[in-house]
Image (cartoon, rainbow, N blue to C red):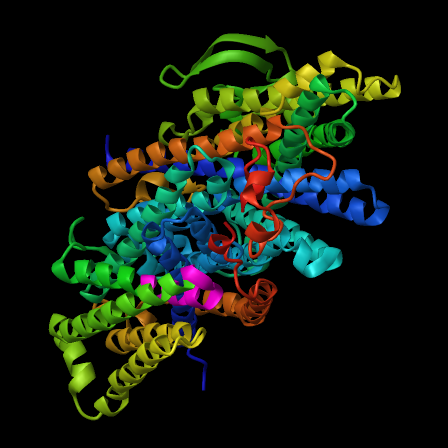
Amino acid sequence: MDALLLARWQFAFTISAHIIFPAFSIGLASYLFVLEALWLKTGRSVYLDLFTYWKKIFAIAFGMGVVSGIVMSYQFGTNWSVFSDKVGPVLGPLMGYEVLSAFFLEAGFLGVMLFGMQRVGPVLHMLATTMVAAGTAMSAFWILSVNSWMQTPAGYGTNAAGQFIVLDWWQVIFNPSFPYRFVHMVLAAYLTTAFVVGAVGAFQLLRDRGNEAARTMFSMAMWMAAIVAPIQVVAGDFHGLNTLEHQPAKIAAMEGHFETRAGAPLILFGIPDMARERTDYALEIPKLGSLILTHSWDGTIRGLKDFPPQDRPNALIVFWSFRVMVGLGFAMVAIGLWSLVLRWRRRLYDAPWLHRAAVAMGPAGFGAVLAGWITTEVGRQPYTVYGLLRTADSVSAVAAEAVGASLVAFVLVYFALFGSGTFYILRLMSRPPHRNEPDLPADPMRASGIMPAPAMDAQDTVPVR
Amino acid sequence: METDLAFVWAALIAFAVLAYVVLDGFDLGVGILFPFVEEEAQRDDMMNSVAPVWDGNETWLVLGGGGLLAVFPLAYAVILPALYVPIIVMLLGLIFRGVAFEFRWRTRRGQFLWDWAFAGGSTLAAFAQGIALGALVQGIPVRGRAYAGGWWDWLTPFSVLTGVALVVGFALLGATWLVFKTEGPLQDKAYRFARLTGVGTLLAIAAVSLWTPFLNPAFMHRWFAWPQAVFTFPVPLLVAAAAFVLLRSLATRRELAPFLAALALFVLSYAGLGISFYPYIVPTSVTIWEAAAPPESLAFLLTGAAVLIPLILAYTAYSYWVFRGKVHVGGGYH
């Protein structure tokens, strides 16, 4: 394999591993914010118990997000140095703003949020939680602006050195696809977290229907599913229409259309064949494709044959990743509706089949987020900056051995370490939330004196700290 | 007169990297010293002394990388491929130690694994950073707008020396931090570590300083030619003063002074490097003005940095203040 392909695999692997953690921590930070606010407002201890329970899980996930994110900020330089040189003047400042306005905010207040309750009191602690949540949202804002600019570049010029330069920052930041992508991703993060919380709540309800904290978290998660999942379908539709306008080749690949047609069908399933330029075994609904994309029965949709072969994204991958995302999305809507029906019949906590389905859907958000990102990123190919800079022209002049060896190292280390982290998170989730849920260290600076190690049960190693 | 934005940004990036070196330096140093403390409770205290702040410390590294991409994209595009292997090793080391902060408390049976991840990752990251620094000092060849050397050029006796020097230096920062944050038997150990690594750090500074001028005639000229020697020769004198304060305050068992003296040693060594480098950002191929992004990019990010960096410093200071005071001595409890 050549360095280009290895560098692409390395990026695909490290970014896929990374996005899992922010997708979870953006939503979980907001959830922690809501829980702590509800606790301060109502004084009900169940909210504090849930806050403490999820805070421990947040700490692990956030840590993995931080370290896998540092890798991303250096990989642009190691493997994609030509890209970095050319787009640095445009995208670098946006990432700079992400570090200054988001990463420092999260990191600065994370310590207080995790360990500082005893030291600063509830009000300042609430402020710290707010800052962490605001930081995660701000981070999403900037990095999605960066990604969107690569999909739909705007507000730029070029200079003599061959670099992109900025003519209008407003157009760069709020480039055509950014508002849609930002809304779609933030909702996706909220749904991902809601389904994880819902799965843990459901798992605990299956064991003990009376656990008040489990009831509360399950109910909150199902409200999110019922309200946010349908909104996400609408947001996704708008995002798709935006893509049709700016990246028609990506839409053609997502839909498996090779021919340009008026009144195009919706291909439900099929196997796009790039070499022979057709979609085999297609199961079609006539005219529906045009209706969805153009909101007219006879609208024209461009097929991949409209684009030169060297400018086409891989339809086999994009077609299927898109269907995985949409399928999971509709399953989320279904769970939300099901929960509404049972809630209306006052049987929400007494519905083992819903609980089992919710447990099964626990990882659904991660699957949908990954599938969605694969769709949009593979669909941008063969470009890094759509229509302007090819992926093949973006890579470092780096030895294939170096890229290959580092790829192997990342794969081994990520599976070992993030696998362990996932195991620890699952173990924490498997324990029911307690009344007076034991805190993290309480406070790492004094904890070993306040809570002697032998006082806790063998499984719960947390208060050792 | 127009503001020299490239110069302002070079100073800001230099500040970010220095902030990273001294801040993550002490928490990496705590990791480097981990294997030399055997009592579990004392290890708990060591880790707890940095647990609330390490994440913020490491963010300066992201600012250094992200900032370089934003304002000196050419330097970013040249330096990272040139230092490919040490950068990857550093990243892997940082991952191991970063996850250890959380994982270590989640298991008893596997705790020794995460102790090793913490110690090994910290040491490896420090060593790789030292190697990267040495490789940068010895110079990076550039052709067109890309790195023009081989994939093992970074590995030289000089870069191995700087690698070892940074491990010893970070261990000194870690040891003096522990002197400041702990008491009892762990503090006694920290004093001992600080004396050893203090002497080691001074020897390393001497060796690197004596070697550097011979790497490149430009460095030699910078340090010894008249009249700029007027500005350069106070640096070694100040280093000697800081060394005296360090050893003296350790002997008299002061608690904060050794940490401050160790910080001073780092700041001075860093200033010495800056004196050697200037005006290059990729020695001796690319100057800060050649590497600078177009002025509109520099100005746009500078506006935000002028507002946000003071805020960052304020709330970072607040976070340190919240967790002020001694870590409880777990070792004394049993």
Which quadrant of the structure image shows residue A359?
top right
Q: Answer left or right for A37 relative to A246.
A: right
Query: Residue A257: where, in percent of width, then height?
Result: 51, 19
Q: Is residue B67 visible?
A: no
Q: Residue furthest front?
A: B334
Q: Residue furthest right?
A: A345
Instruction: Give me the residue at 55% from left, 31% from top.
Output: A458
Numbered range of the magenta stretch: B170-186
Query: Residue B181: where, in percent of width, then height?
Result: 48, 64
Of residues B5 and B277, the one nearer the viewer is B277
Q: Answer left or right for B22 relative to A287.
A: left
* Number of numbered discs on residues: 0
Q: Answer left or right for B276 relative to A374.
A: left
Query: Residue A465: where, in percent of width, then height?
Result: 54, 47
Residue A330 to residue A119: above or below: above
Instruction: Give me the residue at 45% from left, 32% from top.
Output: A420
Of residues A96 and A386, the one nearer the viewer is A96
Query: Residue B39: where, in percent of width, then height?
Result: 40, 49
Residue B182 inside the magenta-drawn segment: yes
Which quadrant of the structure image shows residue A158?
bottom left
Q: Quadrant of the N terminus of chain B?
A: bottom left
Instruction: Give me the residue at 39% from left, 29% from top.
Output: A308
Of residues A254 and A15, the one nearer the viewer is A15
Of residues A364 and A258, the one nearer the viewer is A364
Instruction: Give me the residue at 61% from left, 21% from top.
Output: A328
Residue A176 to residue B303: above or below: above
The chief SS type of the magenta part is helix
Residue A438 inside the magenta-drawn segment: no
Q: Is residue A410 visible?
A: yes
